[in-house]
Amino acid sequence: MKNRLRGVMVGLILTVSIVMVSVGCATSVTMRYMVPAEVNMANYKNLAIVSAEPYRFTAFTSPSTIIQDMSGTSPYTVFSGFGGNTEREIAKYLTTRIVSDLTKADYFSLLIPPSSDDIGLQYAKFKQLGYDGLLQVRVSRLDVDEYVYAKEETEVLPPEVEGGEPTTQKVLHHHVMQKVAITVEFIVKDTATGETVIVRSFSDAKEKSYKIDPDSSNSFSAPSLYDWLRPMVDRFSSDFAKLVAPRWITKSVALMANKPENPRVETAYLEAKEGSLQIALEGFLAEWKKSKHVPSGYNAAIILESFGQIDQALELIDEVWRYSGNPTVESRKIQMREAWESHKKAQQQL
C-alpha cells in the first residue's frame, strides 16, 4: 500500500485531477492535493493493530436489563436499549472501522486481527516481525443512563354537548429518557522501546427522551443505544486516521470571469470548459503577455498549478497580483503557496 502511495508522490510534484466542471456559467478546475498528518508517523508505517478493548462494567455499574421507573407510577415495563453484549459489539465494530480507515489511508503496512491478536502485547515479537508500532484501542468510558419519568400535562377535551364549552384536565404522561456517553483512546507504542508514540482520546455523548404512547403495549424495548454509538465510533476512527496519515483533498478553483470582457480569449474559455486545458493555457498566457488582461493571467496561473508546475504558477500569479492588486488574485496566491508548503510537508512523511 505504502509503495503505491510513494510511487505517486515521488513521480509528481503535485498530483491534480484535471476535471473541468461548470458551476452556473463559471468553469472550475478540480485540484487534488496531499495534506500532511498532524502526527508524523513516518517511522511507524509498519503498524500492527490489535482488537479494541471493550469497556469493563462492574456488577454495580452494568446497565440494568429493565429501565428503572423514577416516577413510581408507570404501568409499563421498558427493557433497556443497551443489550447484554453491546459493549463487546461496539469494541468489535471499532476494530473493524479503524482497520478499514487505516487501510483506506494507503499509507501503512498493517498487521491486523486476528493475526495480531495471536501475539498479544508482546512488543518484541512485533518488532521481530518488522512492525515498528503497535496501535492499541480501548473504550475507556461508557456511561449509560436510562429511566422512566412522569410529567403532568394539560389536555383539552371536546365539549360533551354540541355548542358546549371544551374542558381541560390534568393527565400524567410517562416518558423514557436515554443518555449515553463514550470515550475511546488510541495509543501507539514503539515496539522497540515500549514507549508511547501518540495517545489521543475522543469523546461524545447523546441524550433523548420520548413520550410513551398510552396505547403502547405494557412491555416493550427502548431504542437501541448501539445504533447511537456506531456513528460516534465512526467519527472517532475517521478522525484518528486523519491525525496519523497524510491524505488527499480536492478543491475546485473557478476561472476568473472574462471581465473586463476581452473577445480574444473567448476561445480559451471555451477550450477550458471542454477540458482542453493545454490549449486554454496557451490562449490565456498569450493574452496576459500581450495586454496584461488580469483574468487571463489568473487563469493561466491556476491551470499551471493544475499541471503541477507550481513554481511557474506562483511566479505568474505573483506577477498578476503585483500588477493588479486584485484581492481574488491575492487570495488565490496565498492559498496556492499554503497548499504547496503543506504538500511538501506531506512528502516528508512518506
Image (spheres, rainbow, N blue to C red):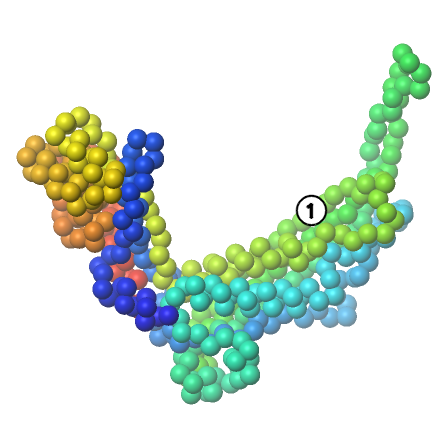
Q: Nearer the viewer, residue 284 or 188?
A: 284
Is 57 above or below relative to 282?
below
Question: In the rendering, at what x and y percent does residue 348 appear?
Answer: 28, 66
Q: Name the residue under label 1.
A: 208
- Residue with the most extreme top position: 163
Residue, x 84% and y 25% (percent of image)?
156
Q: In which quarter of the image is the C terminus?
A: bottom left
Describe the element under mark 1 as helix, strand or loop: strand
Q: Quick check: 251 left or right of 55?
A: left
Q: Residues within 10 Å of mark 1 (few under 14, many from 20)?
A: few
Q: In which quarter of the image is the N terminus?
A: bottom left
Residue, x 21% and y 54% (percent of image)?
308
- Residue with the most extreme right position: 161
Is 318 above or below relative to 102?
above
Residue 218 visible in this rendered orientation of the protein: yes
* Location of residue 185 (image quadrant): bottom right
* Location of residue 256 (image quadrant): top left
Question: In the rendering, at what x and y percent does residue 283 appear?
Answer: 13, 38
